[in-house]
Amino acid sequence: MIRAASMTKTGPVVLLGITDENLVRLRAGLPIKVDLAEFGLGLVGDVVIFHGATHTEIVQQFREVGIDMPDPKRAAADAAAIDADPRLQRRSP
């Protein structure tokens, strides 16, 4: 995984580049954990990346590690709302 970070006028931005090898591990049920302190931006905590073919699979993985999640249909609706957020859309170069 490639990791980078930058401080912007709106705050810190953390970039994570996932390789094919990372995808193989994620698909095998091995989440990737990243310590935010590594980026030197004064961030505290961790980011954990999971993979699943569906939202239901991901919610199940969350539950397996002890994270209580809402109903998978609700999680899918929440994810769709996030995907629709124009602030998260890619910008053309």
Image (spheres, rainbow, N blue to C red):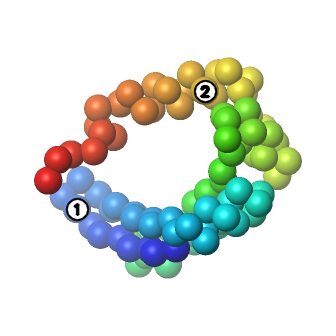
Q: Is residue 43 toward the left or the right of residue 52 in the image?
A: left
Please tell me which residue is depicted at 35% across the width and 30% down the height of the picture. Answer: 85
Task: Say which label, 1 or 2, has the lower sequence index.
Answer: 1
Q: Position of residue 47 (x, y in %)?
A: 58, 60
- The residue at the point 49 percent across, 78 percent down is 38
Visible residue check, residue 85? yes
Q: Nearer the viewer, residue 9 or 60?
A: 60
Q: Quadrant of residue 60?
A: top right
Question: In the image shown, does 18 or 13 lie closer to the viewer?
Answer: 18
Task: Examine the rendered structure and indicate whether residue 35 appears above or below residue 80.
Answer: below
Q: Amino acid at mark 1?
A: Thr
Depicted 48 relative to depicted 74: above or below? below
Q: Circle 1 sits on which residue?
A: 8
Q: Give the structural element (helix, strand or loop) at label 1.
A: strand
Residue 12's spot in the image, x, y percent? 33, 62
Tell me where residue 58 appears, x and y as whole percent.
71, 42
Residue type for callout 2:
Ala
Disc 1 residue crowd, few under 14, some 14–19, many 20+, Cα 10 Å: few
Q: To which residue does mark 2 refer?
A: 76
User: Which mark's residue is nearer the viewer, 1 or 2?
Assistant: 2
